[in-house]
Amino acid sequence: MSTHEAVQAGETPSFAAASVRARMRYQLIATMLSAPAIALMFLLLIGPVVAVLLLSFTDWSLGDSDFNWVDMATYQEMVEDDIFWKAIANTLIYVGIVIPGSIILGLGAALLIESVTVGRSFWRAVYFLPVMSTLIAMAVVWEFMLNAKFGMVSQVLGFFGVEAKSWLQEPDTALPALCLIAIWQALGFNMVLFMAGLTSIPRELHNAAEVDGVRSAWDRFWLVTWPLLTPVTMFVAIITAIRSFQVFDTVHVLTKGGPDNATMVLVYQIYQEGFEFFRSSYASALTVVFLGFIFLLTLFKVFVVERKVHYQ
Amino acid sequence: MSSVHIQNITKSFGKVEVLKDVSLNIPDGEFVSLVGPSGCGKSTLLRIIAGLEQQSSGQIRIDDRVIDNVRPSERNISMVFQSYALYPHLSVFDNISVPLRMSRLNSIQRLPGLRHLLPGARAVEKGIRADVEQVASLLDMKQLLDRKPGELSGGQRQRVAVGRAIVREPHAFLLDEPLSNLDAKLRVHMRTEIAQLHRRLGATFIYVTHDQAEAMTMSDRIAVLMDGELVQVGSPDDVYNEPQDIRVAEFIGSPRINTFAGEIRSDGGVDLLGVPTGLVTDAEAGPAQVGLRPEALRLVPVGEGVFAGTVTHIENLGAELMVHFVNENMERPAIIRLDHIERHRLDVGESIEIDFLPGAVRLFGPDGARVPTEEFMEKQLVNA
Ligand SMILES: Nc1ncnc2c1ncn2[C@@H]1O[C@H](COP(=O)(O)OP(=O)(O)O)[C@@H](O)[C@H]1O
Ligand SMILES: [Mg+2]
């Protein structure tokens, strides 16, 4: 630092050395004070991830007393594993159906509830009910509803001439049935977020649209509601995506990944490999892939959603 | 352009009656200000005219057409909102073109993206661009067309809101306190601009404000709204010089009109703080209030005044001087406006004597309504 700069920075040259020492001491104290938090972060958050990553390069199985480094062998096996690709494809299909499904229906429910004048809190509570109940418990209900003989779904569809099936046991319909349950559950949560978003749209903006000649609800939706909901929609999409990637409970309770791996999803495969077949290293490799997806979503959220969709 | 007729409008929110039997006829091309303190119902009346609020009773007509059951979007009335209500995600250009797109494109052509693809829409879009650019150059904001509202200053946003209102040719323009979010200097500047815009467009303007100075400087006529009632409608001169209600007298004019305790004697003479004013009236005897504007009071040499007082405060505004004074009979200090040249060597605490012209006295009865007066042998009574 030249003398000139030092003076500009508010220091006189003779004090510069002293101030460097002061700054170093300040740094030291700051580091010491944040050390416990940093240590905990490594121990609890980064540590396990690194452990999983390391584990995926070994041949360790749960219960083994020893292990060998196998480099990329586990990943090699994974790439050649049909079930893995099936699980990836199913997970992506599942996410790809649940996101738009629960967003469109959640937004629709929010708009409908906003438009009624009486019984708003009743409808809100009804739609929110699935969010508050555990999915495991509700899975029992769904298993019943999707039953071929006396299930409500079969009966209703039968009314329209659709042949009754055991929806959860058919390879063609098992995954869509799980998507349906997920949408049913996520809808209420998304609806509540959309309702919060709707109330934050200034009333005068809708008034301005009216005065500007907007006649139909359709035009008002595209001119005001939808654009102003973009931040909420992005947020809802990310939340739903992350939750859908983690789908496990319904698969475990209702289909166990079957029939014929038709509902095998990534987390369920991790569970099977890790806790049924005790192939910890393979489960670790799958987990690394899973974390990769979540990481991509997080990046997307940070760089696209948080940057782009804020007005003002 | 059209005339707007407001007939016996009342409006209640639940039990609260916000507008009480308001009637006002606004001829084609007039600039009328609705002025009154906050909460008196100005915005509500404007929103009823726009159709954004339904009146409890009464009728709104545009020319000869009753529009009570016509939706806001079908009324063809433009409105500038207090918050400007710009679409935050649209550029200035798109904001201004919304009213045109709504009327000139059909609902399929309006869909995002399609207006650039469909050949029919493209031609219309060209016309819209020309119109928006014309408005932008009229309001001197051509360089802002690509920006988003979030990137504009308060004054620029206000211009965009005005642009969106004038881009089509509505029956009338409604403006709800459009200048209240601007700083003082810009506000004074925009007053002139809006008044000029009105002259250029020759359109019917209904302008809501709580700032009496805006109403005084811009309007053809002022309608003073108090507690939901239209107390007086008239030209700015009329409202200032001949207030028909003490609330109007106190609301219009800055500094505020001085009011003194007065009395109507049984012989019809009018006293001010116990001193005869030289005025007589036919009204019933009893207590009354006497209003005198600060410029109606005169500082006179000792011994020539009608009443005396002590200076409590002096506001020096450069060109003029506001002298606050009080005496033992007055409930609160009164103000005299003095020209700079008259700037005698006054000091706080000094005793002064005050005189006034009887013709400047505005007398109000106990209910606040104006009481007509006549001058009667002025000097004798004053010096009695
Ligand atoms: N939607 C509404 N519901 C209930 N009261 C309202 C509503 N809108 C306005 N008011 C009341 O009506 C009165 C007049 O409001 P407003 O017209 O906005 O006044 P101004 O514009 O003159 O300040 C206020 O007391 C306000 O609280
Ligand atoms: Mg208002």
Image (spheres, coloured by chain):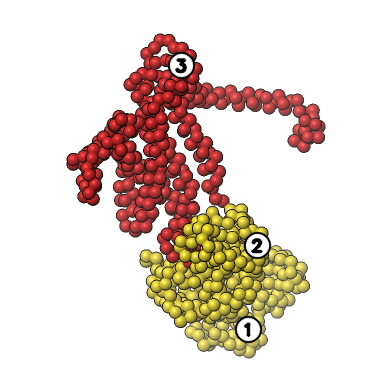
Chain colours: A red, B yellow
Location of the N terminus of chain B (image quadrant):
bottom right
Q: Give the structural element (helix, strand or loop) at label 1.
A: helix
Residue lying furthest bottom: B377
Instruction: Give residue B55's quadrant in the image.
Output: bottom left
Q: Give the structural element (helix, strand or loop) at label 2.
A: loop
The residue tagged 2 is B141
Q: Nearer the viewer, mark 1 or mark 3?
A: 3
Left or right relative to A145: residue B41:
right
Tell which circle, 2 or 1, labels the residue nearer the N-terminal end. Answer: 2
On the image, the x and y values in percent for residue A279 come to 38, 19
**Disc 3 versus disc 2: distance between alpha carbons?**
67 Å
Crowd tier of the residue under label 3, counting other residues whose Cα lies within 10 Å: few below 14, some 14–19, many 20 or above: many
Crowd tier of the residue under label 2, counting other residues whose Cα lies within 10 Å: few below 14, some 14–19, many 20 or above: some
The residue tagged 1 is B359
From where the camera sits, is residue A137 visible? no
Query: Image height check: is B139 above or below B276?
Result: above
